[in-house]
Image (cartoon, coloured by chain):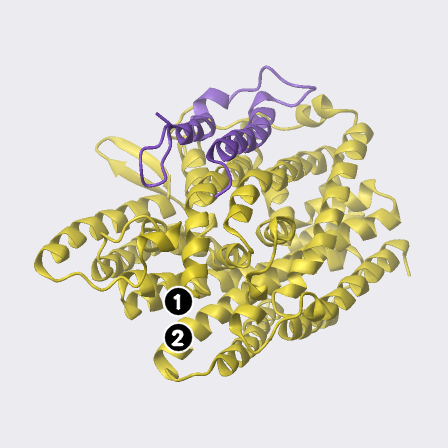
C-alpha cells in the first residue's frame, strides 16, 4: 500500500468516526426536524464559518475551476469575483432571512415564501426548483471524489459505493451535526494543501513568470472585443449572476438557518471571503498544471482519458508532492465532497418533507414523523446521485448543474425581494417563475446545454449574457407588471410575517 | 444625522458599490501589466479584490454595530 493511500484511509476513518460521534455533540431531540436538519439552530460564528466554507467550496469546485483555467485560461477565473461579490448579498439579505426563519420556525426558503405570500403553489415551485437544482450538484461531488480515488489507484465502483454508504449512514444518524463537525477537518486540510501548493509548486516550476509564459496569448486574457463570446461582457454577467444565485441554493440557506444568532451571519459574510482567496489560488493551479506539462506524461494518460481536464489538479499533485502529502491533498478533496453532499441532501430532504410531503400528503404529520421522513429522504437523494454517476451519467450531471444555476436564480424575486417587500403578488411571482424557467432552459438548450451564455440580439448589438441573468430579467419584469395588475384587482393575500420578524 | 435612512439602510452601505464596480468593470482589469511577481494584472487584481471586498464588508459591519 502506498504512503498516499495509507494517509488517505487514515483521514477518511477519522472523519467517519467524527460523523457518527457528531450526533452526541450538543445533543438534541432528533425527532424534531430543526434538530436533525438544522442542528437545533445552535451553531455559533466559528462553526458556521467552517460549515459554510465546507458547504459552498465543494470538492467539485476545487477540481473543476482549475480544470477550466487549465483548458480555457482567463475565462475560468470568473469564479473568483463571483465568490467575492456573493458575500455582499449575503451581508444584506441573509440576516433578515435568519431572523424571519427563527421567528416563524421556517426550515426552508419555500417555508418563508409560503408564509410571506400565502401561496402553497408558489412555495411548491420554489421547493421543486431547489431540489432539481441541488440534485445534480450532489452527483458532481461524486465526480470530484471519483477523480481523486482514481488518482490513488482505486478504480471501479466499490470505493465510491463504500464512501457513500458511510456518508449516508452518519448523515441519517447525526443530521447536519455530522458535516458541521467534519467541515473543520476538511477546511484545515484544504488550507494546508493550498498553502503547500502555492509555496512548493511555483518554486519547482521556476516562478510565476515562467508559469504564465507558457500560457497562450488567447487564454492569458479575455478577448479585447468586449462583446466577443466568451469575452468581457459574458465574464461580468457570469460573475454577477452566479453571485446573486449562490445564497438561493438550499444548501446555503440551510447553513444560514443553522446559525445561533443573527450577528453570526454578518460576521460570516465578512470572514467567508477567506475561502474565496483560497479559491483564487486554487484556480491558478490550472496554469501550474499546464506549465508542469502533466497532460503529455504517459503515467497520467489514463486519468486524462477517463476524467478529461478534471484530472489536471490530481495529476499536478501526484507529480509535485511526496506520497504522504498526496494522501493529505486527496483526502482534503474527498472529504470536501462529503460535507456539501451531506448538507445538500439534508436541504433537499427538508424541502421535500416540509413543502411537498407535509403540505400535500400529510397535513396532520407530527414533528417526529416529519423528522423521520426527512432522514429517509436524505438516503434516497444520495442513492439517486450515486446511481446516476455509476450509470456513467457524469456528463448529464454537469449539464444539469449548469441548468441548476439558471433555475435557482428564478427564486430570487420571491425570496430575495420577498425579504424586503410584500408588494409582489404570489400569483404574479408564479407566472414570472414559469417565464424565467422556460426562457432560461430554452436559452441553454440552444447550445445543446453546453454553455450557459446566450447571445441576445438587441438592435445591431449581439450581447453574450449569462442566461440566468437575462431570464431573471424577464421573470422580474413579468412579476412586477402582473403584481401591479393583480394587486389592483384583487384583495392582498395574508402575510404571516410582520416587519419586526425581520429585525 | 446618524446616516440612517430607514428600512435598515445607512449611507455607509453605499461603500459596497465600490467592490461591485471594481469587479464588474472588466475592461479595467483585462490587461497583463503591471504584473506582480510574474502574475499578470488580470489575476492578481481579482485576487486582491477578494480581500478588499472583505475589508469593505468589515468596515460596514463595524459601522452597523452588532444587532
Q: Where is residue A335 shown, x and y percent of the image?
A: 71, 58
User: On the image, numbered disc 2 is attached to which residue?
Assistant: A356
Could you tell whether A145 is left or right of B13 in the image? right
Q: Is residue A149 visible?
A: yes
Q: Earlier in the sequence, mark 2 or mark 1?
A: 1
Question: Could you confirm whether marks 2 and 1 are on the same chain?
Answer: yes
Q: Chain A colour? A: yellow
Q: Is residue B45 above or below residue A196?
A: above
Q: Residue at x 22, y 52 (%)?
A: A423
Q: CA distance from mark 2 to mark 1?
A: 9 Å
Q: Label for residue A359?
A: none
Could you tell whether A362 is left or right of A218 in the image? left
Disc 2 and disc 1 in contact, CB within 8 angstroms = yes
Task: State the SS at label 2.
Answer: helix
Q: Chain B colour? A: purple
Q: Where is residue A314 shown, x and y percent of the image?
A: 73, 48
User: On the image, numbered disc 1 is attached to which residue?
Assistant: A128
Q: Is residue A311 above or below residue A161?
A: above
Q: Residue at x 58, y 62 (%)?
A: A343
Q: Quadrant of residue A290?
A: top right
Amino acid at each position: 500500500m502506498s504512503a498516499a493511500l495509507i494517509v488517505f484511509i487514515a483521514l477518511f476513518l477519522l472523519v467517519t468516526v467524527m460523523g457518527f460521534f457528531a450526533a452526541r455533540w450538543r445533543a438534541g431531540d432528533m425527532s424534531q426536524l430543526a434538530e436533525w436538519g438544522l442542528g437545533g439552530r445552535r451553531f455559533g460564528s466559528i462553526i458556521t464559518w467552517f460549515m459554510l466554507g465546507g458547504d459552498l467550496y465543494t470538492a467539485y469546485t476545487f477540481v473543476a475551476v482549475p480544470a477550466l483555467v487549465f483548458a480555457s485560461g482567463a475565462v475560468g477565473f470568473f469564479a473568483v469575483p463571483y465568490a467575492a461579490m456573493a458575500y455582499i448579498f449575503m451581508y444584506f439579505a441573509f440576516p433578515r432571512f435568519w431572523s424571519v426563519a427563527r421567528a416563524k420556525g421556517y426550515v426552508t426558503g419555500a417555508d418563508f415564501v409560503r408564509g410571506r405570500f400565502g401561496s402553497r403553489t408558489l412555495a411548491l415551485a420554489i421547493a421543486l426548483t431547489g431540489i432539481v437544482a441541488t440534485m445534480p450538484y450532489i452527483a458532481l461531488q461524486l465526480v470530484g471524489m471519483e477523480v481523486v480515488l482514481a488518482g490513488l489507484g482505486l478504480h471501479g465502483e466499490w470505493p465510491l459505493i463504500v464512501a457513500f454508504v458511510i456518508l449516508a449512514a452518519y448523515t441519517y444518524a447525526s443530521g447536519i451535526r455530522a458535516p458541521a463537525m467534519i467541515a473543520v477537518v476538511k477546511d484545515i486540510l484544504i488550507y494546508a494543501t493550498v498553502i503547500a501548493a502555492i509555496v512548493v509548486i511555483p518554486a519547482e516550476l521556476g516562478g510565476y513568470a515562467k508559469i504564465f509564459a507558457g500560457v497562450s496569448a488567447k487564454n492569458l486574457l479575455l478577448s479585447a472585443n468586449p462583446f466577443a463570446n466568451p469575452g468581457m461582457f459574458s465574464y461580468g454577467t457570469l460573475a454577477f449572476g452566479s453571485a446573486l444565485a449562490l445564497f438561493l441554493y438550499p444548501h446555503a440557506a440551510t447553513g444560514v438557518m443553522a446559525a445561533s444568532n443573527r450577528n453570526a451571519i454578518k460576521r460570516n459574510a465578512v470572514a467567508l471571503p477567506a475561502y474565496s482567496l483560497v479559491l483564487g489560488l486554487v484556480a491558478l493551479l490550472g496554469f501550474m498544471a499546464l506549465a508542469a506539462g502533466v497532460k503529455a506524461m504517459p503515467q497520467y494518460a489514463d486519468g486524462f482519458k477517463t476524467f478529461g481536464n478534471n484530472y489536471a489538479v490530481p495529476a499536478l499533485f501526484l507529480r509535485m508532492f511526496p506520497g504522504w502529502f498526496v494522501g493529505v491533498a486527496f483526502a482534503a478533496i474527498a472529504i470536501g465532497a462529503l460535507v456539501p453532499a451531506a448538507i445538500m441532501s439534508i436541504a433537499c430532504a427538508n424541502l421535500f418533507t416540509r413543502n411537498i410531503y407535509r403540505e400535500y400528503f400529510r397535513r396532520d404529520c407530527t414533528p417526529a414523523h416529519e423528522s423521520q421522513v426527512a432522514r429517509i429522504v436524505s438516503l434516497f437523494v444520495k442513492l439517486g446521485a450515486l446511481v446516476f454517476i455509476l450509470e456513467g451519467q457524469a456528463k448529464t450531471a454537469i449539464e444539469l448543474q449548469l441548468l441548476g444555476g439558471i433555475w435557482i436564480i428564478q427564486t430570487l424575486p420571491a425570496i430575495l425581494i420577498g425579504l424586503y417587500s410584500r408588494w409582489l403578488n404570489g400569483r404574479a411571482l408564479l407566472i414570472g417563475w414559469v417565464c424565467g424557467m422556460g426562457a432560461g432552459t430554452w436559452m441553454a438548450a440552444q447550445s445543446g446545454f453546453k454553455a450557459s451564455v446566450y447571445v441576445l440580439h438587441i438592435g445591431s448589438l449581439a450581447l453574450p449574457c449569462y442566461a440566468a441573468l437575462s431570464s431573471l430579467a424577464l421573470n422580474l419584469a413579468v412579476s412586477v407588471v402582473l403584481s401591479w395588475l393583480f394587486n389592483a384587482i384583487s384583495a392582498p393575500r395574508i402575510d404571516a410575517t410582520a416587519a419586526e420578524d425581520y429585525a | 444625522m446618524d446616516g440612517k435612512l430607514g428600512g435598515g439602510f445607512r449611507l455607509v452601505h453605499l461603500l459596497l458599490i465600490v467592490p461591485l464596480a471594481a469587479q464588474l468593470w472588466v475592461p479595467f482589469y483585462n490587461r497583463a501589466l503591471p504584473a506582480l511577481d510574474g502574475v499578470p494584472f488580470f489575476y492578481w487584481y481579482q485576487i486582491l479584490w477578494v480581500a478588499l471586498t472583505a475589508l469593505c464588508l468589515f468596515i460596514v459591519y463595524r459601522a452597523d454595530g452588532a444587532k
